Image (cartoon, rainbow, N blue to C red):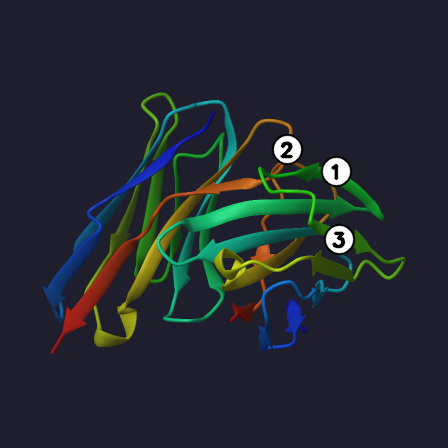
């Protein structure tokens, strides 16, 4: 059974800092990994999708890496802004069920 | 291009009633997924439909059911509502059965059971 863990659970940083969010998964036989952002009480916004054959993906100030063999992914956010404050979720797609298995999220607060 | 839409935004029901939630996928997407996000429990997979068929379901009781219509929109039904069914229900869609296909999420329906 796939299990996904995110560390840290919460993070508070001053504006302008670079930061790293971590995601680990127990079954390395994945199809892909997605990073999402969720604002309070809202749906999910997809940030980056990394296929199992890829090592990293970049979008603007975001960079996500994937090390499938060790069961780890990191989301790097450069030059953080108050608008980045949200909960960040990673999810892996594995097995034949096509479902996503989600981590519990990292709640990020970027302060002025 | 319109994203995934869900209705209603909020739904308030009493224990024992039935709730019906609706989802319209992105145009061209044939797969629809339902997830439950209950307070303190994280996002849990509920159901997956593709081409009108239920392809997989999560570890939820049979009173959670649904269907997918010929236009690929979907309906989630929750019978005999219990207090613990109160949650944000999220719908996602993707292109077909391809394992690499990205899932796009709607804004969710907030179900409150009193």
Question: Quick one: A3 or A85, which is closer to the camera?
Answer: A3
**Disc 3 vs disc 2: which is toward the camera?**
3
Residue at 42%, 56% in the rendered image: A36
Q: Please, what secondary structure does the residue beneath circle 1 have? A: strand
Relative to A89, is B52 on the left or the right?
right
Residue B100 x, y percent position in the rendering: 60, 39
| Residue shown at 35% from the left, 54% from the top | B40
Q: Which residue corresponds to mark 2?
A: A97
Location of residue B55 in the rendering, given as x and y in whole percent from the top left corner:
74, 38
Residue B90 shows in this picture: yes
Q: Mark 1 points at which residue?
A: B55
Q: Residue at x 60, y 39 (%)?
A: B58
Q: Residue sitting at 53 percent across and 42 percent down?
A: A100
The spot of residue A110 in percent (x, y) is 17, 69
Q: Measured along the vertical axis of the image, is residue A48 above or below residue B20? A: above
Q: Residue A67 carries which label?
A: none
Q: Are marks 2 and 1 in contact (CB under 8 Å)?
A: yes
Q: Where is residue A56 in the image (x, y as percent from the top left)?
A: 38, 41
Q: Nearer the viewer, mark 1 or mark 3?
A: 3
């Amino acid at each position: 059974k796939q299990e996904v863990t995110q560390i840290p659970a919460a993070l508070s940083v001053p504006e302008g800092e670079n930061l790293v969010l971590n995601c680990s998964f127990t079954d390395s036989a994945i199809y892909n990994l997605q990073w999402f952002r969720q604002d309070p009480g809202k749906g999910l916004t997809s940030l980056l999708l990394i296929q199992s054959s890829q090592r990293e993906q970049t979008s603007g100030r975001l960079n996500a890496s994937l090390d499938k063999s060790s069961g780890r992914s990191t989301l790097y956010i450069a030059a953080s802004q108050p608008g980045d404050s949200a909960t960040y979720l990673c999810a892996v797609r594995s097995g034949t069920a096509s479902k996503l298995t989600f981590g519990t999220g990292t709640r990020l607060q970027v302060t002025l | 291009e319109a994203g995934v839409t869900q209705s209603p935004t909020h739904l308030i029901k009493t224990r024992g009633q039935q709730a019906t939630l609706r989802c319209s996928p992105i145009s061209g997407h044939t797969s629809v997924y339902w997830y439950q996000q209950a307070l303190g429990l994280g996002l849990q997979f509920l159901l997956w439909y593709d081409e009108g068929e239920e392809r997989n379901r999560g570890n939820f009781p049979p009173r959670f059911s649904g269907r997918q219509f010929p236009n690929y929109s979907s309906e989630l039904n929750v019978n005999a509502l219990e207090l613990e069914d109160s949650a944000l229900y999220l719908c996602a869609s993707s292109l077909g059965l391809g394992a690499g296909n990205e899932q796009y999420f709607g804004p969710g329906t907030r179900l409150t059971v009193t």
